Structures are given as C-alpha cells and as structure tokens.
Amino acid sequence: MKNPVKTKINLAVFISGTGTNLQAIIDASFNGQLDANIKLVLSNNPDAFGLKRAKSANIPIEVLSRENYTDRNKFVEAMFSILKKYDIEMIALAGYLRKVPPEVIAKYSGRIFNIHPGPLPRFGGKGMFGLKVHEAVLEAGVKETCVTIHKVTDGYDEGEIVATRAVPIYPDDTPQSLQERVLKIEHEFYPEVLQKIVRSLLYSCD
C-alpha cells in the first residue's frame, strides 16, 4: 500500500514580542488558508505577549533563552531537542530578535524563513528591526518601502529573498504611521507566502 498523501506541514513559529504576525499565521492556519499545523511557538522572551496568543489558540509554547545557558552547545542541543519533540518540519520567524544557531539553520535549510519590514539588503542587518527600519527608510527619502520575506542564513537578513510586496510612503508619514501600514501588509502577505512555500514542500514530498 502507498503511504497516505501528506496534506500539512508541522510548523514552528519563533517570536520575541507581541506576536501580531504570529496571530495572522494562527488565523490563516485555523481558517484553512495555510496548510500547516502550528505545533510550537518558541520565544526567547518569557514575557512575550505572543505566548498568550499561542495559549489562547491551544498551541504548545516553549521559552528558550541563550542567556540561561553558559554552554553554547547545550543551548543548541536544547533547541534541537524541542524541535524534535514537536516533529517540526518548517520554521517561520515572526519578530524573533535573536540569531538562530547555524546548526539549526543548516538542519532546516530551505525550510526556515523570516519576514522583514523593509527593503533588503539596504535596510537590513544587525539591529535593524521595528521602528528602526522605518526611521531609516524615511531618512533615506525613498518613495516606497516593502515587506520582504527571505530564507534565513547565518547572516542577519542576508538570505535569498523569496517575495516582496511594495508599500507606498506618503509625504506626512512618521515612522509610526509607516509601521502601522506595513504591519497590515505583513499580516496578509506572510501567511500567503508561507502557504506557497508549504504547498511547494508538500508537492515535493514522495
């Protein structure tokens, strides 16, 4: 007998803060717009509001902080152990403000993705997140910004760009108003792109 056709990917979402993109991913999964079982929400921050979102959706959570490990290898082992525990096949970073260990990136090569609130590589790199990106974009005087989804590699925001969606900049924009508009796009765009990736992975499975 043939093995049953796999219809969903086991997904982990990594967060550090409020988890608005996490909520968008949860909603897409529950509404049937994303063929993924969210098996895990992992955070480096025990106070991240996104953990409450996960609990409300009955999604398992794990808190794993590098600061709690004097031995780096033990931290990496702990992350691998957690991912194995939940049988994770794909990882989506959604406001995760820590570098993923290169060993984990290698293990999930082509299956770990991040969303960035601006054009890459110009407005990316270490320390470029949240309002800092929008401040830099406005200071540069560009006419539009974009949401960027990319593969995760060892370097900050250096992975292959998977998809972008343009966001207009208005003359009276502030970093806060631009952030609000970009976030609205992120919440639509990230689940859409993740679904395309998931379908590609599922169809590539024997």
Image (tube, rainbow, N blue to C red):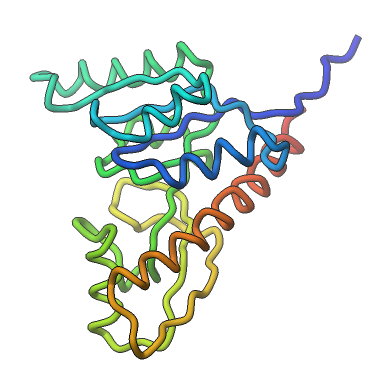
> Going 61% across and 26% down the picture, which residue do you hit?
37
Question: Which quadrant of the figure has residue 10?
Answer: top right
Residue 131 sits above or below residue 3 on the image: below
Q: Where is residue 149 in the image (x, y as percent from the top left)?
A: 48, 57
Pick out the residue farthest to the left.
70
Q: Where is residue 153 in the image (x, y as percent from the top left)?
A: 37, 47
Quadrant of the rendering where the N terminus is positioned: top right
Residue 108 sits above or below residue 114 on the image: above
Left or right of 82? Residue 57 is: right
Of the pair 52 and 133, the residue shown nearer to us: 52
Q: Where is residue 193 in the image (x, y as percent from the top left)?
A: 61, 53
Left or right of 112? Residue 178 is: left
Pick out the residue farthest to the right.
1
Quadrant of the rendering where the C terminus is positioned: top right
Of the pair 45 and 173, the residue shown nearer to us: 173
> Going 39% across and 35% down the picture, which residue do you hit?
14
Of the pair 206 and 136, the residue shown nearer to us: 136
Question: Which quadrant of the figure has residue 62?
Answer: top left
Residue 53 sits above or below residue 199 on the image: above
Left or right of 46? Residue 152 is: right
Left or right of 25? Residue 82 is: left
Residue 96 sits above or below residue 62 on the image: below
Q: Where is residue 102 in the image (x, y as percent from the top left)?
A: 31, 36
> How many numbered callouts?
0
Of the pair 158 and 21, the residue shown nearer to us: 21
> Going 65% across and 32% down the picture, which residue do you hit?
30
